[in-house]
């Protein structure tokens, strides 16, 4: 094994500042999207998944499979609107306008 190997890269440590993070919550670390593996108390360190497919709350509007998806921190949901939002990945499947959630393939297309 290479001596410069650090880790597999499927998860990162994350320390929230200002609020607790619940298991399954999406967090933004710079330009990386992560989903908390477990509850993480404010100021404590926990692991977040940075790859994989996760069902996340979706804004209204239909979404095609493979479309780039963005996180709206204002509305705490996934949207196809780039302006003012953070790119988090792509749609792993299509979603209808009225669907409350969408499967997101994290950090693809960044």
Image (spheres, rainbow, N blue to C red):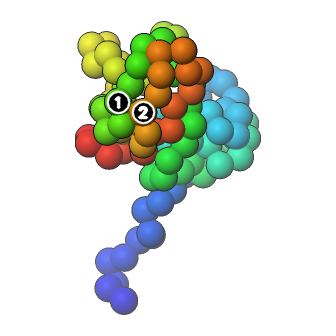
The image shows residue 92 at horizontal and vertical percentages of: 42, 42
Query: Which residue is drawn at the image coordinates 47% and 15% (left, top)?
Result: 97
Looking at the image, residue 23 sits to the left or right of residue 12; the answer is right
Query: Which residue is drawn at the image coordinates 51% and 56% (left, top)?
Result: 11
The residue at which mark 1 appears reads as 64
Q: Nearer the viewer, residue 84 or 6?
A: 84
Looking at the image, residue 30 sits to the left or right of residue 58; the answer is left
Q: Quadrant of the N terminus?
A: bottom left
- Determine the secondary structure under disc 2: loop
Query: Which residue is drawn at the image coordinates 36% and 37% (left, top)?
Result: 65
- Determine the secondary structure under disc 1: loop
The image shows residue 91 at horizontal and vertical percentages of: 39, 36
Q: Which mark is residue 14?
A: none
Q: Nearer the viewer, residue 55 or 63?
A: 63
Query: Which residue is drawn at the image coordinates 45% and 69% (left, top)?
Result: 7
Q: Are marks 2 and 1 in contact (CB under 8 Å)?
A: yes
**Considering only order in the chain, which callout, 1 or 2, is on the residue closer to the N terminus?**
1
Q: Nearer the viewer, residue 28 or 53?
A: 53
The image shows residue 74 at horizontal and vertical percentages of: 48, 10
Does residue 94 show up?
yes
Q: Nearer the viewer, residue 46 or 70?
A: 70
**Crowd class of label 1 (few under 14; some 14 to 19; many from 20; radius 10 Å):** some
User: Marks 2/1: CA distance?
Assistant: 4 Å
Where on the picture, by quarter, is residue 28? top left
Does residue 31 show up?
no
73 versus 65 height, above or below:
above
58 versus 91 height, above or below:
above
Q: Quadrant of the C terminus?
A: top left
Q: Which mark is residue 94?
A: 2
């Amino acid at each position: 094994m290479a001596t410069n190997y650090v880790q597999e890269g499927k998860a990162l440590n994350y320390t929230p500042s200002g609020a607790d993070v619940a298991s399954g919550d999406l967090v933004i670390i710079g330009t990386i999207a992560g989903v908390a593996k477990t509850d993480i108390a404010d100021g404590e360190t926990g692991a977040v998944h940075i790859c994989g497919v996760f069902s996340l709350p979706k804004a209204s509007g239909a979404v095609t499979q493979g479309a780039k998806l963005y996180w709206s921190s204002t509305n705490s949901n996934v949207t196809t609107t780039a302006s003012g939002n953070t790119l988090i990945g792509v749609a792993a499947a299509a979603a209808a306008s009225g669907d409350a959630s969408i499967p997101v393939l994290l950090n693809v297309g960044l």
